[in-house]
Image (cartoon, rainbow, N blue to C red):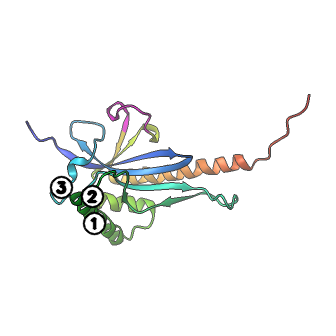
């Protein structure tokens, strides 16, 4: 049996969790013969970065205390999400991966979301970016979803566009909430 050629990619998608709009960048792999991303558990040994659960997560922040302020995009540093069980070897690999990513972010002086996106890609050796068609997974299997593939630079630009789109949608929602409500005429 021949070894399947796998490459590292970044999966970018919009997710709404409990009314908050998130834009997640998750480390994934891609097998050469498939046009959809795969899981990332295979890349957790041999001194390579651990990818399982590695995510750059950002969210649209809506200030509740000041309704006149525009929404902003809050980006946390890369972290491992949804790791339900961590063994010692995996913890060491997580630490090594996060250290490598943090050093790359510092080396690139990445402060803006798109720059952090590229720094993450460089640190883990990502070669491509994939997004579900229309920015969100619609359920079902990954192989049943339509995927759009980009190079790193175009993927970064699409990531920035998704952030601007999420902020624009939230500003529109805020404008609708600020409109005065007209009373219903009595008959």
Q: Position of residue 16 (x, y in %)?
A: 51, 45
- The residue furthest right is 187
Q: Decide which of 14, 99 is in the foreground and name it.
A: 99
Residue stretch rendered in magenta on the structure = 137-147
Provide the residue designation for mark 3.
45
Instruction: Report which quarter residue 94 is drawn in.
Output: bottom left
Residue 97 highlighted magenta (yes or no)? no
Residue 130 screen position, x and y as percent: 35, 44
Seen at 33% across and 60% down, the residue is 120
Residue 165 placement (x, y as % from top left):
54, 49
Q: Secondary structure at mark 3?
A: loop
Specify which label sits upstream in the sequence, 1 or 2.
Answer: 1
- Percent coordinates x, y for residue 75 in the rendering: 47, 60
| CA–CA distance in space, label 1 to label 2 | 8 Å
Q: Residue furthest top?
A: 187
Residue that label 1 marks: 100
């Amino acid at each position: 049996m021949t070894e399947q050629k796998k490459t590292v990619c970044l999966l970018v998608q919009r997710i709404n969790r409990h009314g908050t709009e998130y834009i997640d960048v998750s480390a994934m792999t891609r097998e050469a013969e498939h046009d959809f991303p795969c899981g990332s558990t295979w890349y957790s040994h041999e001194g390579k970065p651990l990818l399982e659960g590695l995510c750059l997560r950002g969210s649209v922040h809506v200030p509740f205390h000041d309704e006149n302020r525009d929404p902003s995009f809050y980006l946390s540093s890369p972290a491992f999400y949804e790791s339900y069980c961590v063994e010692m070897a995996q913890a060491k690999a997580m630490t090594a991966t996060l250290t490598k990513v943090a050093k790359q972010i510092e080396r690139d002086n990445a402060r803006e979301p798109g720059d952090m996106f590229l720094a993450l890609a460089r640190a883990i050796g990502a070669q491509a970016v994939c997004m579900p068609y229309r920015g969100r997974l619609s359920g079902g299997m990954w192989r049943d979803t339509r995927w759009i593939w980009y190079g790193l630079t175009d993927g970064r630009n699409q990531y920035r566009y998704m952030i601007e789109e999420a902020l624009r949608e939230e500003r529109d929602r805020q404008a609708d909430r600020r409109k005065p409500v007209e009373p219903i005429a009595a008959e």
